[in-house]
Amino acid sequence: MQQSVISKLKSIVGKEDILTSKISREVYSYDSSPFIFEPDVVLFPESLEEVVEILQIAEKDAVPVVPRGAGTCLSGGAVPLNGGISLVLTKMTKILEVDTVNETALVEAGVPNLTLQKELQPVGFMFAPDPASQKVATIGGNVAECAGGIKGVKYGVTKDHVLGLEIVLAGGTVIHTGALAPAERFTPDLTGIFSGSEGTFGVITKCLVKLTKNPEAVRTMMAVFGSLDQAGEAVSTIIARGIIPTTLEIMDKNQLRAVDDFLHLGFPREAEAVLLLEVDGYEVEIDRQVDTISGIFQEKQASSVQRARDDAEREKLWLARRSGNGALGRIKPAYMVQDVTVPRHKLPEMLRFVSEMSNKYNIIITQMAHAGDGNLHPHLLYEPNDTEEYERVEKASREIFQKAIDMEGTLTGEHGIGLEKLPFMKMQFTQADLNFMEKVKRALDPNLSLNRGKVLEL
Ligand SMILES: Cc1cc2nc3c(=O)[nH]c(=O)nc-3n(C[C@H](O)[C@H](O)[C@H](O)COP(=O)(O)OP(=O)(O)OC[C@H]3O[C@@H](n4cnc5c(N)ncnc54)[C@H](O)[C@@H]3O)c2cc1C
């Protein structure tokens, strides 16, 4: 990038909010995926006006821009594939309004998800999307990826909780969508277009989000099964009997052993699957739901069922799930995590298929899944320096993608397409679908300056 352009950018954000040294650029060449591409410059705008001016200069000087939140993207969406500007929103962190009457919050895009949750907790509300990365992942990043979380089965994903957005388009034009636009009722769902757009349509600067009342009562349970099929049938039966759990997670035996070797929680070594389940609702009716679920677990021959009696026990049950990723580091230093989805009743078949890939390609695969919404998270473990092993991981991933599509599922439930799944878009979408997506991209960003090369091959 020309020095004159860097000087102009520096005059916009000030010397505190620009990084150009080699080491800083290296830091921002990563997200949480295996991809690495260095930006020419890293900028931390602190206001809408600064974002506008940056995008004006970027357009004029043909500089690529990649919006970025906390960089927790698992599919390569936040790495600067074509160099240029890494536009980091993490200094735009104002919670501008919490309106408990209308049940909304207006926040700047760089507010970390957990910061918003902590602000809402004392007034009796939550922001329902709760990705496991919530400690750092930003609300803007959540919207751009349409993030989910463990409560997705009951409360949905981020797009279900966004009411309006403030966005800066390529070139610097500011637009407002949804409830932030004056004539909201008469517009198409423009907010929807930006949810899950992975930084390719515009830079999100403000989000008006919907709040959800904290439930009166919560119950947590764990059931151990001797087969994946029994666990899978329990999942389908619970939902078929009209119970929508807040959370319904499954872990397979590889994952359980990894966690147990790490935390010594005493899981039976012969267990093939564990279901971790939470229901919420009103105190008067919640124990009835728990009894029904216990009955289903027994019907499906769970070898043990535990109910958390208090918050400490609840925390203990959750520890196994939350420590899932960390436990894997003891086995191999790196993993690729996939997040294909399949119809819920096909989950056991898909879990079995993934296990077969582990044998076929001689790699370790552990499995966790948001069972309630058929969203698998197989972790394919590898040594970063072993290129041959990494190739086997890629081949296994490809088969997993193909199988999910063949089972009428999707490439991604919540982690996005980014760079990682780009080569597989043709598996899922027709050429007409892809052409239409390209038309939308070109209409919003004619010079393809925003996050080019992600989601669509352009
Ligand atoms: C340990 C771990 C656990 C995770 N758990 C979950 C989970 O449970 N559920 C889930 O859905 N995901 C999960 N993720 C993935 C990730 O955390 C989410 O996608 C999250 O929403 C990304 O937020 P971020 O602020 O880190 O965005 P980044 O990673 O910085 O960016 C993600 C994408 O959004 C774009 N973007 C970011 N901010 C903006 C903005 N303001 N305007 C326009 N585009 C923008 C970027 O260009 C990029 O394409 C996890 C990741 C990790 C590392």
Image: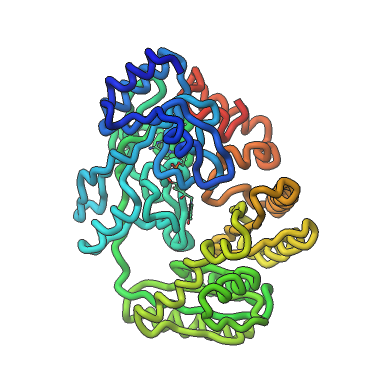
Query: The C terminus is located in which quarter?
Result: top right
Determine the residue positioned at 54% across, 40% down.
76
Name the side, left or right, on which 240 lies relative to 154: right
Q: Is residue 275 above or below residue 19?
A: below
Indicate the quadrant where residue 165 lies: top left
Q: Is residue 237 visible?
A: no
Q: Is residue 230 above or below residue 169?
A: below
State the residue in front, 179 or 381: 381
Instruction: From the top left corner, tell me how far across and down residue 313 is, in percent.
Output: 40, 81
Indicate the quadrant where residue 172 lies: top left
Q: Is residue 51 visible?
A: yes
State the residue in front, 205 or 128: 205
Instruction: From the top left corner, tell me how far across and down residue 334 is, in percent.
Output: 60, 54
Q: Is residue 382 above or below residue 285?
A: above
Determine the residue positioned at 43% across, 31% down.
86
Determine the residue positioned at 48% across, 41% down.
196
Give the residue furthest to the right. Answer: 360
Instruction: From the top left corner, tell me how far across and down residue 291 is, in percent.
Output: 47, 85
Q: Is residue 292 above or below residue 203?
A: below
Determine the residue positioned at 65% across, 56% down.
380
